[in-house]
Image (tube, grey):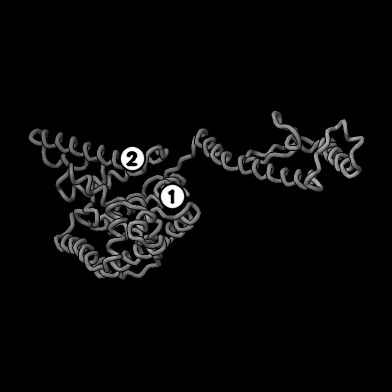
Amino acid sequence: MDKHDADLALVRRAQSGDKQAFNLLVQKYQYRVKHLVCRFVSNQADQDDVVQESFLKAYRSLANFRGDSAFYTWLYRVTVNTSKNFLVSRSRKLSSFESIDGDSMFGQENSTHLVENASPEVVTKNDRLVEAIKQAIEELPQELKEAIQLREIDGMSYEDIAQLMKCPIGTVRSRIFRARESIRRSISDHV
Amino acid sequence: MNGNFPVNEKLSQLVDGELDDFESEQVLDALTKDAGSQRGWGIYHLIGDVMRGEVDQVGTNLAGRIEQTLSAEPTVLRFPAADEVKDENRREQKIVKPAAIFTIAASVLIFAILMFSPQDNDQVIPDPDSLASAPADIRQMDALTQEFEGMLANHGEFTATPGLNGLIAYVKFVSKQEPQIRNR
């Protein structure tokens, strides 16, 4: 039986007017997109701007997505183009900085600038969240840790994991779910 | 914010792409409507991203702010192109037609076995020329068959499909096509 493509199903729902479906795609890919943007943009606030602009551009051109490629492949291209456009735009501003006054540099971007940079306290809290997740993974019972690592890092299917771990598919399904729930409970104070 | 939300094993399987189409659509229906499940969806994906080293920094509710910005965007609507609809119908026909043909063929075979099964192992089905001298029960079976075929032809409800012989020619094929409206 063919596995269900959840991304494509969410895209189809978004194309039918369900914005919440697109928000689920944002939640799924926000960190991967930001990780990609970081290769082009070093400033934290600028990174968030470019991430937001990438998703906005993706949403605005979603009607053009036919499903010929994977959704993330398409989103990847949108993000790279948005990042490059940002760099070009910024370099033009920097090169014309001496000929214009500082006030006219602002208000001309296409992107909606995020209101403010994160405060140091918020940044520290979110770093702690990442550390808490890593710690929770390390503290998992071995069979749960192995199952979720094979799934998330090696990208193996439940069937392949079951063969490797020599257990039924139902056991794999249960171990991965229990691993996620254990991590979620461990980080509940941080979210 | 506490961590209580109605996630379950189905959501975990959906994240891994391990549900079939029907179950996936059911879980997606619930997911798009339930804020608690949406938080679970986000956390499950965050866990995977952290494990793969794809999270530099969690950030300050980036998804929430994007959602807020999107709410002001005009809603995207896309209508599938005609060739995409044809492809979808063709894919469905590829499943329905062979299944229908197989079912009908199996029914006809069973009918043929019941109608034409020999009375005993030594009996040979006679050729038409020898029917006159055939035993009465064989003549009766042949008469029944002819009557049945005549009934099918006379009623005219079933249209013979070109290229197919025998009883199958009078059997109606079902496929996923637009119904034709009969002019009265």
Please, is residue B127 above or below residue B54 in the view? above
Q: Nearer the viewer, residue B181 or A17?
A: B181
Disc 1 target residue? A3
Q: Chain of mark 2?
A: A
Disc 2 target residue? A74
**Where is residue A79 drawn, in percent x and y?**
27, 41
Task: Locate residue A168 relative to residue A73 in the image: left or right.
Answer: right
**Where is residue B145 drawn, in percent x and y?**
84, 40
Extreme residue toward the top, this view: B163
Based on the displayed image, in which of its 4 quarters is residue A183 positioned?
A: bottom left
Where is the C terminus of chain A found, in terms of image quarters?
bottom left
Helix, strand, or loop for circle 2? helix
Circle 1 packing at 10 Å, graded few (<14), some (14-19), many (20+), is: few
**Where is residue A142 drawn, in percent x and y?**
26, 66
Q: Amino acid at mark 1?
A: Lys
Based on the displayed image, in which of its 4 quarters is residue A163 positioned?
A: bottom left
Q: Nearer the viewer, residue B90 or B170?
A: B170
Based on the displayed image, in which of its 4 quarters is residue B10 positioned?
A: bottom left
Q: Which mark is residue B59?
A: none
The tag earlier along the polypeptide, 2 or 1, is: 1
Instruction: Determine if marks 2 and 1 fall on one subunit.
Output: yes
Helix, strand, or loop for circle 1? loop
